[in-house]
Amino acid sequence: MISNVAVVIFCVALLLMAMFFIWSIRKKKERGLIHKIYLILAGAYSIWLLALLGMRVVGEGHTGILFCLDAVTNSVGVFIPVLSLLISVVFVKGYERLPRKYYALLILPIISNVVIWTNPLHHLQYIRFSIVRSEIIFGPYLAISGLYSAACLFAGLIIMIRFVRQNHSRLYIMQGALFIAGNLVPLTVSAISTFSQNSNITYTPISFMCSILLAGIAIYKLHFLDVKPLAVQKIMERISDDYLVLSDKELVISYNMSFVRDFGEKYHIAENKFLADCVKEIMPHEKAMLFNLMNALDSCRESGSTITYEQADTVIRTDGKPAKNYFIVEVTPLYQEDKLSGFAVLFKDVTQLKKSLQQLQDNQQRMMEQEQLAFLGQMIGGLAHNLKTPIMSISGCVSAIRSLVDEYRESLDDPQVIKEDYEEICDDIDSWLEKIIMSTGYMSDIITAIKGQAAASSTEETPNQQFTVDEMIKRSWLLMRHEL
């Protein structure tokens, strides 16, 4: 029947299941399809254990009650391998809603329930029922349900093995290994029980205890299916430098070694770790990078589109001096069946490009300065050439006026100098002053024209100015006069 050791194991398992259900109900986060299937699986397994404990309590003297409790164990037992297979399918395919075609897997378990509860009418499940293993005579249908359960476990095993071979993420390998072990244990025990006459009815539920425990660790401890497996494949097709894959809850799923070298070790970013937890482990002056990334993730979540920004990161060079690396960060949302499943983050190193652009700008600035200096030299040369003639003219006029002034002073005491002579001297002075005015006006026009030319050649923006054709011709004539 059921040993005392098995009773203790079942009671501990039921206590853990009760604690799990309470925790799951109080958990406020949204449950995915994978979590819902696991809850159904855990509930079915709990009913199985309760029925087995009921058989131990009832004892051997109540065959009818024992038959009903055994029917309960078989009723829920046929669903457990199917639920285990569905977990594998949902994980690999990334379903958030189970396609209708997979409901066909439940047809045979439903038929099995009908056969089990109507066994006294046809004896397809048991030809003779007994609590003693050697006295039981099984009906033909038991082989069908047994093969179907084994086929479901084997199919789930193959699906997970193929997935682990195709994906090389350490986290996925750990999750896949747990699930493979969880399927392999009950499959092995079922095979041994089929060919052994000394097997006990507690062996199969104990073996499924391993399956449920390992699946629970993969789902809840390792955050199984928080982001779809397809995310890694998509990001690998676009990878150029560093990449990081996050779940929709900002859990680190995968990254490459380049990311570890540039960011992972410095910011304590590791697989199966939330970004919020990474922030708590770094120094305050280093949190800007993670805050920028988390803000970009929030913007990406709200907008549903790719967010791009520039990130500067301080590194220590080989000579011990700090330097800055620059990255263009691109945060892309990952959707599965119109639901956000995670984020793909690409880090494009643009440090060398930024240095090249800065060098190009510096070269352009130097060229512009050289051109401005050359233009200034030409302008000064032209200005000197244009101003030399009027300055010499003014100098000559001043000398002539000085001579007339001296002549005027000497004639003051000369009685032979009459009024008309003084008027003639004044007329000559006026003539020379008129020439000075003309020369200074010419010099002013030259300076104004050259100043306008310098402003037009400047790189700085100047306000629009109005001018007439006459003014343009006059300025051109002034600038070209010495050449012409």
Image (spheres, rainbow, N blue to C red):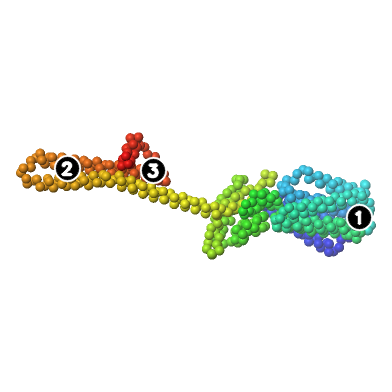
Q: Within 10 angstroms of label 1, few (less than 14), some, or many (20 or more) residues?
A: some
Amino acid carrying label 1: it is Thr
Counting from the top left corner in percent of width and height, residue 62 is at 91, 56
Locate residue 422: give its quadrant. top left
- Mark 2 element type: helix
Amino acid carrying label 3: it is Ala
- Mark 1 element type: helix
Extreme residue in the front direction: 484
Q: Earlier in the sequence, mark 3 or mark 1?
A: 1
Q: Choose between 92 and 367: the one closer to the eye.
A: 367
**Residue 95 visible (yes or no):** yes
- Mark 3 element type: helix
Q: Earlier in the sequence, mark 2 or mark 1?
A: 1
Counting from the top left corner in percent of width and height, residue 392 is at 24, 46
Q: Earlier in the sequence, mark 3 or mark 2?
A: 2
Disc number for residue 279: none
Say which quadrant the C terminus sits in. Answer: top left
Q: Choose between 350 and 186: the one closer to the eye.
A: 350
Residue tagged by mark 2? Answer: 429
Find out whether the residues at labels 2 and 1 contact each other: C-beta distance under 8 Å.
no
At 87% from the left and 51% from the top, the residue drawn is: 147
Residue tagged by mark 1? Answer: 63
Q: Is residue 190 left or right of residue 336?
A: right
Counting from the top left corner in percent of width and height, residue 307 is at 59, 48
Residue tagged by mark 3? Answer: 456
**Residue 22 visible (yes or no):** no
